[in-house]
Amino acid sequence: MNDNGANTNAPSEQEQLTLLLQRVQRLEEEQRKQKKRKRDDGDHNDEEAAPDDVITINAGGKIIQALRGTLCLVEGSTLAHMFTERWQNSHARDEQGRIFLDHDSEMMESIVEYLRVKKIQDPQRKLKPPSFSDIERQDRFLCLLQYFGLKEYFYPWTPLPENFQPVPASSSSVTTSRDQGKHRFHYSDEEVGPGFLALSPALAGQNIYYWKCTIVNLEDQACVFIGLIGRQKPRRDGLCFRSYNDSTSFGWTHCAYVAGKNQRRHAWAGFKHGEVLYFRLQDQVLTMYSTLKNRSFTIPNIPNGPHIHFDFASNNTVVELEPLSISEKSEAGW
């Protein structure tokens, strides 16, 4: 105590701050020790979730480590929910206390690696999703993505361009109309001119497209071609030329046509009146699903930048084109 009554032994303001910081550090260190003891004892109930937490997963016997922020990258997905603080404690654990996921290890590793790259990727660039050459494994991979709520994130689809315009040949007798996003094509007189029709603009190479065609009217023994073509004006070669004979044409009529050549050994046997068809263009593979036949048909090696293409060969043929809905995608197994 000095002459003015002040306590000279009281710590200064700076000393008080130092003591407070030391106390906070001791408390934080004690909390870290407590968490470590609980993890060592297999108790995971009080762990706080943070994006930079390192999560160790036993995926079908393979150990995978990733940041929580990577696993939760796709907000609203099942995978993200699985690794939130609320749900991660409900997972099965292996003998070492690691989260155990009973899924294919290679597929899980592919999912995590894709999410890692997406975190740091320029959003203006497209990243090709992982795929498996074996068709059955690819189907199982898509099922796993669907289960985790990641299918649309890995395989985003591009709607048909809003400015889609039919480009018929100058002498074509195909009449076109549009109502609420649905195109209707009516071929009325085969004697007037060819029934060739392409849609512009072309489909961009790296995007995934889905569309739906309905055969509104197709008379007995009549045929129509539906597919893709590289040229808006196909090259003529002979008097009996049809646009599906063009070397850039891929699709189906009474049989499949690949690069302008018919593939009679292909399982396809022609369209029917009233038939509804779903189309997908992905990774240069054109897939057509027939709701009538409950079956998919594919043509690989489609060149980049094709146009949706029709070739009408018979009078009074009417076809409608419109975007594919999410429920219809699911019906086709996409």
Image: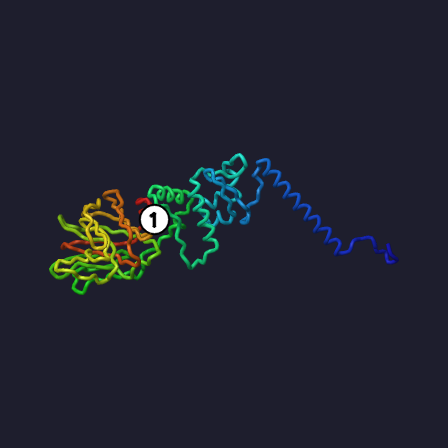
Which residue is rendered at x = 71% and y = 49% of the image? 22
Residue 79 at what x, y percent from top left?
46, 44
Left or right for 93, reference 283:
right
Residue 180: name its quadrant.
bottom left
Q: How many marks?
A: 1
Colour mapping: rainbow
At mark 1, the secondary structure is: helix
Residue 238: name its quadrant.
bottom left
- The single residue placed furthest to the right in the displayed view is 3
Left or right for 30, reference 72:
right
- The single residue placed furthest to the top in the displayed view is 95
Q: Residues within 10 Å of mark 1 (few under 14, many from 20)?
A: few
Which residue is rendered at x = 16% and y = 64% of the image? 171
Which residue is rendered at x = 69% and y = 46% of the image? 26
Q: Nearer the viewer, residue 19 or 233?
A: 233
Residue 93 at what x, y percent from top left?
51, 36
Residue 320: name its quadrant.
bottom left
Residue 332 at what x, y percent from top left?
30, 45
Q: Nearer the viewer, residue 160 or 107?
A: 107
Q: Residue tagged by mark 1?
A: 326
Which residue is rendered at x = 66% and y = 43% of the image? 30
Which amino acid, mark 1?
A: Ile
Query: Could you tell me which quadrant the N terminus lies in?
Result: bottom right
Residue 156 at what x, y percent from top left?
38, 52
Left or right for 11, reference 59:
right
- The single residue placed furthest to the bottom in the displayed view is 170
